[in-house]
Image: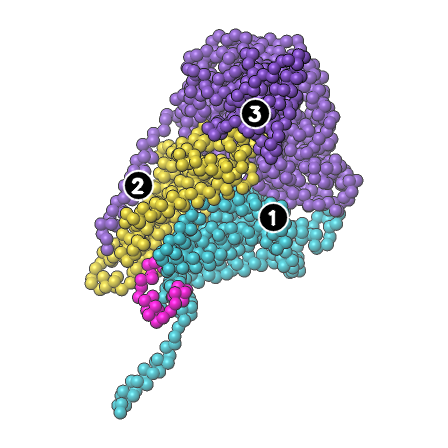
Amino acid sequence: MIWFLLRRLLWMIGTLWAVFTVTFFLMHAVPGGPFSSERQPPIGIKRAIEARYNLDLPVWQQYLLELEKYLHGDFGLSFKMGDFSVREVIAAGLPVSATLGVLALAFALTLGLTAGIVSAVRRGGLLDFSLMSLATIGIAVPNFVVAGLLIILFVFIWPVFPAGGWGTPMQLVLPAVCLGATFAAEIARLVRTGMLDVLNQDYIRTAYAKGLMTRAVVLHHAMKGAILPVVSFLGPAVAGILTGSVVIEYVFAIPGLGYHFVQSATQRDYTVAMGLVMLYTVLLYTMNTVVDVAYTVLDPRVKLN
Amino acid sequence: MPSPDEIQRYSALLQEAQHIRGVSLARDAWRRLRRNRVAILSLAFLLVISILAFLTPLLPLQSPYIQRLDLSFAPPAARPLWTESLKVDDSAAPQAGSTVDWINKQFGDISTFNRRMIELRVKLFGRWSLNSILGRDELGRDLLARLFWGARISLIVGLVATLVSLVIGVSYGAIAGYLGGRVDNIMMRLVDVLYSIPFIFVVIFLVTILGEDSVKARLEQIGIDRITIFFFVVGAIYWLTMARVVRGQIISLKHEQFVEAARTVGADRWRIIFRHLVPNVFSVVIVYLTLTIPQVMLFEAFLSFLGLGVQAPAVSWGLLANQGFRVISPLKIYWWLFVFPSLALGLTLFALNFLGDGLRDALDPRLKNK
Amino acid sequence: MNFRGRNWFVAALLLLLIAATAWALSNKPPQAADFTFVNNTEIRSIDPALALGQPEGRVIMGLFEGLTNWDPKDLHTIPGVAERWEISPDQRTYTFHLRDNAKWSDGSPVVAGDFVWQWRHMLDPLYATEYTYQHWYLENGERYTSKQFGPGDPVEIELHQRPDGALPFARGKVLHGKLIAFIAAPAPNSSASLPPSENAPPQPSATDKKDEPIYLIEIGGHLRAFQTVVDRDLPKWSLPPWAAAAIKDALEKSSTADSKDKTDAIPPAPQIEPSKNVLLDFSEVGVKEIDDHTLQIHLKAATPYYLQLVGFYPLAPTNPRCVETYGYPGWTKPEHAVTNGPFKLDSRVVRSRLRMVKNDQYWNAANVRLNSIDVFPIESSATALNMYLNGEVDWIPLAPNTAVPELLAQKRTDFKHTPEYTTDFYRLNCTRPPLDNKLVRQALAMALDKQQIVDAVVRGGEVIARSCVPPGLPGYESAMCSEYNPQRARELLAQAGYPNGKGFRKLELIYNTDELNQNIAEVMQAQWKENLGIDVGLQNMEWNAWLSASANMEYDVCRGGWIGDYLDPNTFLDMFVTDGGNNQTGWSNKKYDQLIDDSRREGDPAKRMKILHDAEAILMDELPIVPIYYRVSRNMIRPYVHGFYPTLLDLHPLDTIWIDEAEKQQFKDHGGRG
C-alpha cells in the first residue's frame, strides 16, 4: 500500500508539471492579455506595465520564471484583483466551494442512494417510474433552469430564501440543492443500474433462498456491489463539484472557486488561472487515488496494481 | 431398440429443439425492449422529434430570424392560428420578387437541400405559417420556429459529439482495463493529465484560433465550418469519463469466468476485449451514453452562456434556454421564453434517459431468453 | 467482504459532512451595514493609482479624497483637501492651500508632500498605470515617464539599496546629477559601440533586446557611470563587454568637444554601477511642495478643466508611510490601510463583501451620516436586481437592460433613469477598403435607423446620438452628423461606386459577448441589408479577444463606446488624434489634430468650446465612428436613501448619503421587498 501511494505521489508531481506546462502555453497563445482594457494607455506606459509583470520577456523565459516561483510556493498576485495574492483567493474560495460541494454531495448521495435502491428493489412498479422520472428531471434540464425555477418559487413567490450572497445558513440551501440535483439524479440512475446488476447475481438468489428478508438482502449483500459504480463516479463528480458549478455560483453570487475559475479564464488572469488549475489537478488526483483505494476496500477481487 | 414411448419422447424433444432457435443478442434485446412501454414511447417520441427536426424547412413555420420589433416579448397567441408571415414586402429592396432573394431574406444563408425543402413547402402551404403560439422573444422572433430550427442543431451536436466520445472512450478504456499493468498505468495517467486541463481554456483556445480569419477560410474550403469543429471539440472533452467508466467495469469483469473460458478456447486479446468484454459493458456504456448526450447538450448551453457556443443567427435549445433564463426577475416573468425551451430540452432528454433504461434492461446478457 | 473498510468509508464521509456544515454555519456574517450597494465587479484595487473604472471609483471616492471634490448634485468643483487655491493669469500655475485639519485615518496630517509622493509614484515608469497619463498635464510630466532627457539635463538616479533607516518598501537611495553623455548599447550582433548621441535617447522599441544604455553622469563634481538593471537580473549582472571601449570613446568625444586646451587630460573612465532607474530629475516636473500645506502646480499648457481633474479619483493621494511600510499589496489590507476620505476600510472578502466604516479623522466627519457601508461585488446584473427587489441591498447602479422597459412601464420612482456622459458608437476601420472612402462611411451611418435600435432593442429610453460628445454640458454645443436618410445613403453608396451594394464586399462586425450587443448588431445587420443591400457578418468575441481585436484594428466594424472621465468635451475628442491609443480606427486628420492642439492652448473658455466644436464637426463629417446612442443611467435606489443625486458622470460620492431610519423601518415593516 505504501509503495502504491508513493508511486502515485510521484506520478502526481509529474502530472502537475505537465499540466503546468500545457496550461501555461495555452494561456499565452490566446489573444488578449490581462491588461487588455477598454482604456488603452499610451504605448510607453503599456510597455512599462508589461515589463513589471515580465510579460515583455519571450514566453519560454516567462515560463521558467513562473516555474521557479511555483517551486518556491509563490503563486503571485492576481492580475485582475491586484490586492489579493493567488493564495488568498484560493484560501477564500476553496472553503466556500468545498462547503457548497459537500452539502450538495450529501444531498445528492442521500437522495440518489435512496431513490436508486428503492427503484431497483421495486423495479418496474409505479414507485420506480416516478422516482426515476424525478431523477431524470434533474439531469434533463440545465442547472440554471432548475435554479431559475427554484428562484421563482422560493425567492419571488414565497420569499423563503435570499436571492444570493454567502454567509448565512439560509443562503446555503438553494445553491446546494440546485448543485446537488444534477448529481442526485446521476447517482440514482447509477445505483439503480448497479443494484439491478447485483440483484441478478447468484449469491443474491442464494440469500433470498436462505429466507432472508428483502431489507437484509439489500443492505448487507447487494449494497456493496451496487456502490461500486457510484464510487467510480464520485471521483470526477467531486472534482467537478469542488471547482464549483460556475453557473450556480454566478447566479447566486457565491464567491467560490468555480466562479474564480471562469472569470480568470475569460479575463486572462494568468496567475489565478494557473493556481486554480494546479489546485484542480491536485484535488482530482487525490480523489482518484481515494477512489482506487476504496475500490480495493469494497471489492476484494480488485487488486491494487 | 428404444421403446415406442421413448421414441415418442425423443421425437417430441427433437421437435421442440428444432423450434428453439439460437437467438442473437440484438433480436432478443429488441423483443424485450418492445415489452417496455415507456421505452418504446420514448423511442417513438425521439423518432418523431428527429423527423420533425429534419423536415423543419418543410413545415409551415415562420422564419426564425426575422425580427418584429413591434411585437417584442409578445406572449403566446393562438388566434389567429395562421398568419401570412412569409408575405414579402415588395416596396422594400429593389430586387424583390424572385424566390431566391426572398428565401435568403427570411432564412439567411442556407444549404441547397434546405432551400429545396422550403420551396416545396411554399408549394404545399403557400406563404401561410402557424402564428406564434409559443410567443415571441425580445426581438419579436417567433419562438416556435426557433425551437424547431434549434432542435436540428441541438440534436446533431448531442449525437455527433457523443458518438465521437463513445468511439474513442470505449476503445481506450477497454484496452487499458484489459491489458492492465504498465500500459494501463500510462494510459490512465494520460487521461488524468488531460482531465486536469481545464476544459474552458481548451475551448476558448480552440474556438478563438479556429475563428481566426485565415484559419477559418482554409477550413471552410474543406467544408468544415464552425459547427463541425464544435462537435469535435465537445466530443473530445467527454471521452475521458467514458474511458474511465469502461475501464472500471472491464477491471471488474476480466476476472469473470467467461473471460477465462474464452482464453481457454484460444481467443486472442483483441477478440476477448471487443467480442466478449465490450458487449458486457454495453449496459453501463448505454446508461452512460444517455447521461452524456444530455451533458453535451447542457455543455453547449453553458458555452452559449459564455458566448462561445452556437453563433447568431444560428439557434440552439441551449441558447434559447439561456435567453429565457436571463429575463427572469420579480418584475415580470416572460414565462414562455423560459418554459418552452426548457420543456423541449427536458422532454427530449427525458425520453433519452428512459430509452437508455429500456435499452439497458433489454441488453443485459444475463437476462437472455427470459 | 471488508466490513470495517466500508464502515470507515461511510464514517469518513459523514465526518466531512458535519465538519463542512459546521464551518459554513460558524461564519457569522457581520451585522447589516447602514447602507448596502452592489458594485458590478470585484475591484482591482483600493489604490487610486490602479483605478480602472466606475466600480473602483465608487469605493475609492469613499476611501480617499483628492485636492478638490465634486459636488454631489452637479459635479462642479468644490474644495477637498485643498480649501482654497489661486490660479495664475496665464492659467498655467495653480497654488493649492491645504486645510490644516485634513488628516489620515491614523491621525497624521495630510500634507503637500503626500501628493508629491503619490504623483511621482504614478509618473514613475516602473509603476505607471492606465491613468498615469492624467498627470501628463504637468510640466515635464510626460518627459519624466517616457525618460525623455538628454545631455545637460538634471537627472536623478535611483539605486537598488535603500538608504539607512528607510522603511522596508521605500524608494532606493536617490542621487542627483547632470547627464554628461548617453551611450546606447550596440545592436546585439555587433561588437562595435555606437557613438554617443547628442539627442534624447531613442524610445526602446518593442523588440529591443539590446542592453540598457549607459549614462555618464556628473554628481558633485565626479563623473560616474550607471546602467539600469531590473531587479530580477541584478544578481547575475556584470559589466557589459562593450562598455569600456564605449565609455572611453564617449569621454574622448566629450572632452574634445569641451576643452580648448589640448593639454586637458581625458578623465579616467568611471566604474559602471548598477542602478534601478535613471530619470529626469523630479524637481523638473511641475508639482512642488512649497511647505506642508501649500502645493504648487505648473502645467504644460493652460487646461481649463484642471480643477475638475484633480478631483478625479485616480489622482487622490495615498499615505506614503503606510505604503512604504507594508508595500503593495500589503498596505491595502484592512488592518494596514490608511485613508484620508470620509470612510476607512474595515474588512474585505474577495468577491463577497467590502465593508467601509466612518473615518473619524476625516476633516468633515461631522457631516458624514453613515457609519458603515457594505459593497457587494456581484457580476450578474440579474442577481443584483433580484437582491434589490428582495430588500437585500439599497442601491444597484445597473439594472439589467432587459428589465428596463418593464421598470419604465411600471413608472417606478426608485428607478433613476438620467442621461449619462457616455456615447455608444461603432468604429469603422479606416485602413481597410472600402471603409477608407468617406462616402462609404457616411452612407453606412445614414442608413442606420438609430431610433429603431433604441426603441426596439435597447429600450432603455436612450437618446439617439448624432455626435460624439453627449449633450448636457452647459457651454458646449455638439456637432452633429446627418440624420437617418436611407435614400441619400443609397445615393452616397452609388456615388462611391457600389450602386445598390453591388460589388461591396462582406463586412464583418465584431462585438463583445452580450445579449444587448448581439441584438443591436443583428438589427444593424438587417438594416444595412435592407437599406443598402450590403452583407454584414456578425462575430461575437469574448471580452479580451474583442479588446485585442479593437486595439490591433483587426476588424471592419467594431463595437465601441466611451465614458467621459470628466465634464469636458476633450475627454471624448482627444481620443481621435492621429495614433491616439484609444483611436483604434486608423483615422488621421491633420486639421483635427491641429484643432485639438489649439484647444489646449486657448485660454478663453468660450473660444475653446468653439474650437472643440469645429474639431467635432470634422469628426462627424469624416465619421471614423458611427455614434448610435447616448447612455442613460439605470440606477435603482430605495426612497429612504437621501443625498443621492443623478449626475452626468453617474458618480455618486458616498459622504453625502444618509438613510432615513424611520422610513427604512417602515419599508421593512411592510414586507421589505418589491
Q: Where residue C197 sits in the image (x, y, percent)?
A: 65, 23
C5 displayed left or right of C544: left
The reply to whether the magenta stretch includes residue A127 is no
Q: Chain of mark 2?
A: C
Magenta span: B250-275
Marks 3 and 2 belong to one chain: yes
Judge whether C80 appears above or below C637 on screen. Answer: above
> Which shade of the palette goes to chain C?
purple
**Which residue is denoted by mark 2 in the rendering?**
C17
Q: Residue at x 53, y 22 (%)?
A: C272
Q: Amino acid at mark 2?
A: Leu
- Chain B's colour? cyan
Q: Secondary structure at mark 2?
A: helix
Q: Which chain does the numbered disc 3 sit on?
A: C
Which residue corresponds to the image point at 26% horizontal and 92% vertical from the top-left?
Answer: B1
Q: Which residue is mark 3?
A: C244
Task: State the predominant SS element of the stretch in magenta.
Answer: helix
Q: How far apart in space, not on screen, are marks 1 and 3 (Cα)?
A: 51 Å
Q: Quadrant of residue C562?
A: top right
The shade of chain A is yellow
Residue B300 picture location, percent across and down: 50, 48
The image's colour scheme reads by chain
Query: Are the numbered discs 2 and 1 placed on the same chain, yes or no?
Result: no
Task: Say whether residue A209 is visible.
Answer: yes
Closer to the observer: label 1 or label 3?
Answer: 3
Q: Report the residue at 42% width, 51% height from top.
A: B191
- Frontmost of labels 2 and 1 is 1
Residue where numbered disc 1 is placed:
B215
Q: Residues within 10 Å of mark 3 (few under 14, many from 20)?
A: some
Left or right side of C469 for A243: left
Q: Is residue B261 magenta?
A: yes
Is disc 1 placed on a helix, strand or loop?
helix
